[in-house]
Amino acid sequence: MTLPRNPLRGQPWPDSTTAPIGTALQPSVAYTAADPDALDALYTGQVAGFSYAREGHPNATVLARRIDALEGVEGGIVTGSGMAAVAAVMFGLLKTGDRVLGGTQLYGRSLRLMREDLPRMGIDTVFADPTDGPAFAAAITPGTRLVLVEVVSNPTLRVADMSAIARAARAAGAVLVVDNTFTTPAAIRGIDIGADVVIHSVTKLLAGHSDVTLGYVHAHDPAQRKAIYDTATTLGLTPSPFDCWLAERGLMTFGLRFERAQANAAMLADMLAAAPQVARVLYPGRADHPDHARAAALLDGQFGNMVTFDLADTADGGRAAANRLVRAAADLPFAPTLGDVATTLSHPASSSHRALSPTERGAIGISETTFRVSVGIEPPEFLRDAFARALAAV
Ligand SMILES: *Cc1c(COP(=O)(O)O)cnc(C)c1O
């Protein structure tokens, strides 16, 4: 190993005849090239390499290749958040005059992007219910450039009619974008259900430890892939190397975590359904879920880790009972996220869906006593006890 003489220049890795089994973390922003010809070779794609971290860095590539493998694709990119992935797709593929169709129950910020931001740029946005295949298909018209759906909605866990949607999008020449965050590649791969573009909030189940905010996007078409990459790079929607490094570590246990969380979710859904304090349980794996048949056909037995329930009426009304449940569930973090190793509890009316009026919430099946549980990987007995205690306090 020869040491560079400039005392402020980064040191090369010490020579070693052995190789690390963990992935190296590379936080360098810039990379040196031998000379201008070498840079030309890099930028024209004749040789591989990195130049500037906003355009790409090794830890992002390592993480993207692992998520690619789960989705069965090549060439996806990692972004600084799930919303950065959604934004890169919208701003990379759309122009003034285009029309976008979205599902009525998309992630809150995706809805906001479509309702507030895209219209400011002269992009028309419309919404339809993706569980109603014929109605959604009818909303895809010749002017529809892009369709954004989530297979399983938040928080009511309704399941989209993906075959009708994919058929209609293809017939109209619209780009079908699937946000696969809730379902994950363990249940569904974007390419298997006809998606042209697949998005993940890596922040959630894939990274799984609530310590990074990251996204992922892959487009099937190389020109669209390049447009999305260029937009992400220009707008600076880039991930940090350390976050990618942490997420890669989280991803190593994704399969095990998902299996365990899903088994816990099925157990918890049945337990809640049998509890007198609970009026309704929504879990796609249960026969009483409104879309159970579709979920069974689409999700290959992988019904996920999310469970939603409503408390039964109490004398003092919904919010008071909701407050009592949360206070009594001190072992279950009350936090607006999902996909963590630990079970988290969220109350859509005061968090994700607070911008809607009570009537609007009611129309999509959310009341003051609706709770969404992101089930984690705790021992099942712990969860049974924690929920029994919380329900007893209601
Ligand atoms: C959380 C989430 C997002 C946004 O991801 P961030 O990483 O928080 O930006 C997008 N879609 C769905 C379905 C999500 O749950």
Image (cartoon, rainbow, N blue to C red):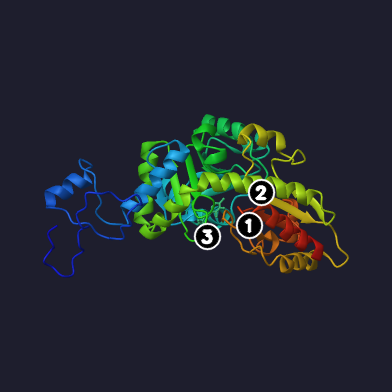
Amino acid marked by disc 2: Asn
In the image: residue 234, left or right of residue 266: left
Amino acid marked by disc 3: Ser
- SS of the residue under disc 3: loop
In the image: residue 20, left or right of residue 321: left
> Which residue has dot 3 on it?
210
Q: Nearer the viewer, mark 3 or mark 2?
A: 2
Mark found first going from the N terminus, 3 or 1: 3
Q: Nearer the viewer, residue 261 or 100?
A: 261
Looking at the rendered image, the quarter that the N terminus falls into is bottom left
Query: Residue 286 falls in which quadrant of the image?
Result: top right
> Which residue has dot 2 on it?
264
Compared to residue 20, the image places residue 336 above or below, namely below
Where does residue 328 sit, x and y in percent of width and height? 74, 67
Where does residue 250 sit, x and y in percent of width and height? 47, 53
Mark found first going from the N terminus, 3 or 2: 3
- Residue at x 24% of width, y 59% of height: 30
Amino acid marked by disc 1: Thr
- Residue at x 64% of width, y 41% of height: 303
Q: Are marks 1 and 2 in contact (CB under 8 Å)?
A: yes
> Which residue has dot 1 on it?
343
